[in-house]
Amino acid sequence: MPETSVEIEPPPPAAGGLRSSTAFRWLSYLFLWPLFGLATAAFGSVSLLASIFDGSGRMQHTIAHLWGGALLRITGSPVRVIGGENLRATPVAVYAANHLSYMDTPVVLSKLPFQFRILARHDLFKLPFIGWYLQRSGQIPVDSTSLRSTLASLNRGVKALQSGMPLVIFPEGGRAADGKLQPFLSGPAFMAIRAQVPVIPMAIVGTYELMPMHTYHLQPRPLLLVVGQPISTVEYTSKSADQLTQRIFEAISEMYMQYAGSTEVSRAAISGVL
């Protein structure tokens, strides 16, 4: 498993003094976070009702797509997709992305133009509304408390891929609290190799600055979702999953560092591209 970590250089501050002021911090506490809660409760309730009529998860995924877009609009943080043609390069793949913030999930839910399943920590399935959605929409819990439970979780992911369902995974296994790209777990590579599907690396840029871990105020800014070219798994075996993991890590690191700290995000916002 790679031990390299990547320092994150924050993108330029978003335009407008209000967005970095104490006033906006209080606006986050008093207005935006209550809206987050209301939106999550509302969409979660609708998704729960939809699951009664739709066992395929398609309706729930559509509702989650709308939920992700609603949260991004609430934060005032539009997303631009770079390399979007790679999202349709193959019908089934493992989509692997860095994980820096709670807002990463709304980004992928709102911008990936197809139904997919997420591998998420098993404890998230116990949360109100979010947990209900995860359970009823067929998402895959990952229990890493023992080797046996971990393998069982990975095998469920392999079966989903073999059935034709793409997976979205955060290989770091959790959010990065310090703004660094953490070492990747080899589970995503293992599943892709076992199912013989490619891995598509994705770099999410700007969500750490938008809402770092363990904070409850927002710094709205334009965001980027950078999608890399598919990485074939044909030449790999289960024994070489670590080598594929390193390749995924390097691909995501390269894409992230290409755009983090650059002026492209702020320029895109000013020019109205986003």
Image: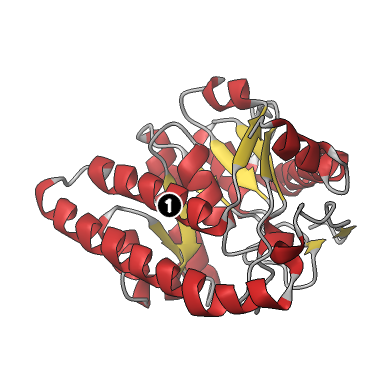
Q: How is the image coloured?
A: secondary structure
User: How far from the left and from the top, in percent, is residue 116?
Assistant: 41, 41
Taking the image as shown, residue 50 lies to the left or right of residue 162, namely left
Q: Which residue is mark 1?
A: 70
Residue 250 visible: no
Quarter assignment of residue 189: top right
Label 1, secondary structure: give it: helix
Residue at image x 45%, y 47%?
69
Visible residue check, residue 25:
yes
Q: Amino acid at mark 1?
A: Ala
- Say whether residue 74 is left or right of residue 42: right
Check the image and report above or below for 123 versus 236.
Answer: below
Q: Nearer the viewer, residue 39 or 173?
A: 39
List x then y, in percent, for residue 68: 45, 51
Quadrant location of residue 41?
A: bottom left
Q: Residue at x 54, y 40 (%)?
A: 194
Query: Split into 4 quadrants, where in the image is the N terminus?
Result: bottom right
